Image: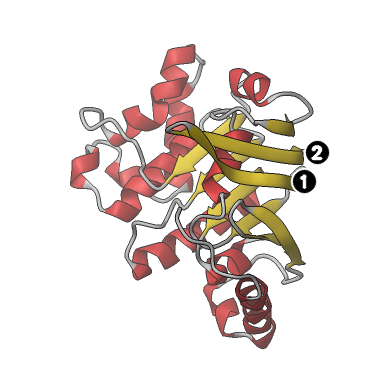
Amino acid sequence: MAVEVRGLSHRYPVGDGLITALEGVNLTVKNGEFVAVVGRSGCGKTTLLRTIAGLLSPTSGQVKVLGGSSDSARQARALGLVTQDPGLLSWLNVASNVRLTLDITGEEGRDERAQELLERVGIAEFARLVPGQLSGGMRQRVALARALAHRPKLLLMDEPFGALDELSREEMRLELLRVWEQERTSVVFVTHSIREAVLLADRVVVMNGQPGHVTAEVLIPLERPRLGTLEESQPYRELVARVRGLLWSEPVAHGD
């Protein structure tokens, strides 16, 4: 099992009190499974992802990643993380940004690995450019390549395409699908976009409320590989409508 979350709760200190972001969350992700998490602002999606990544400690409950702790998975370089901000170093070129963690660990063959990844995400010809010379979509391709550098067993993605225009976002969805088909890495993908979740995932987890909790899961039995034309199909539209209905069946949460 890639991820096992049991009875997870998390509270943030605010002033003299606490705000409960998550309450009693249960989630599993199988090895090689692509799971999307959807929910409105304030339901704790990012808090859940950051807890799985080991960046936050749960107030109560249990989180197991790849059979152990988040810390042990991170130390073994078995986790990859991609967020809305690519977090690239502006003074390094594209190839150096991708190679950065490999340079730190002194891994052999890092030039070849970086080149392979740049080709895989379709930007090998831009290897010598710096991030400021790239579009937002290209920067996210670099961030994805960097996250895959150590061949992680689990990839955590938090609204990675949220800052992109619609055309770039559509392009990156299809690129991610193509790369995932090759790597078959376990993925937890947080998004506000129902259409994006249904297009990408094997299973969509619906979160609602404040504090956030899992209210439903929807299996996505659409054939793979998935192409952009899938979004015009009746089965796809029905699944999108089903997930949307599960989100709107709960009262609106206020805050974020």
Disc 1 residue type?
Answer: Thr
Q: Nearer the viewer, residue 10 or 14?
A: 14
Q: Secondary structure at mark 1?
A: strand
Residue visible at 70% across and 56% down in the picture: 214
Q: Which labelled disc corresponds to residue 28?
A: 1
Q: Secondary structure at mark 2?
A: loop
Query: At which x and y percent is residue 141?
Result: 40, 47
Residue 51 left/right relative to 126? right
Q: Name the residue tied to disc 2.
A: 1
Tally of numbered tags: 2
Seen in the picture, residue 241 relative to 55 is either above or below; the reply is below
Q: Residues within 10 Å of mark 2 (few under 14, many from 20)?
A: some
Q: Are marks 1 and 2 in contact (CB under 8 Å)?
A: yes
Q: Nearer the viewer, residue 202 or 25?
A: 25
Q: Is residue 184 visible?
A: no
Query: At which x and y percent is residue 153?
Result: 67, 35
Seen in the picture, residue 194 relative to 128 is either above or below; the reply is below
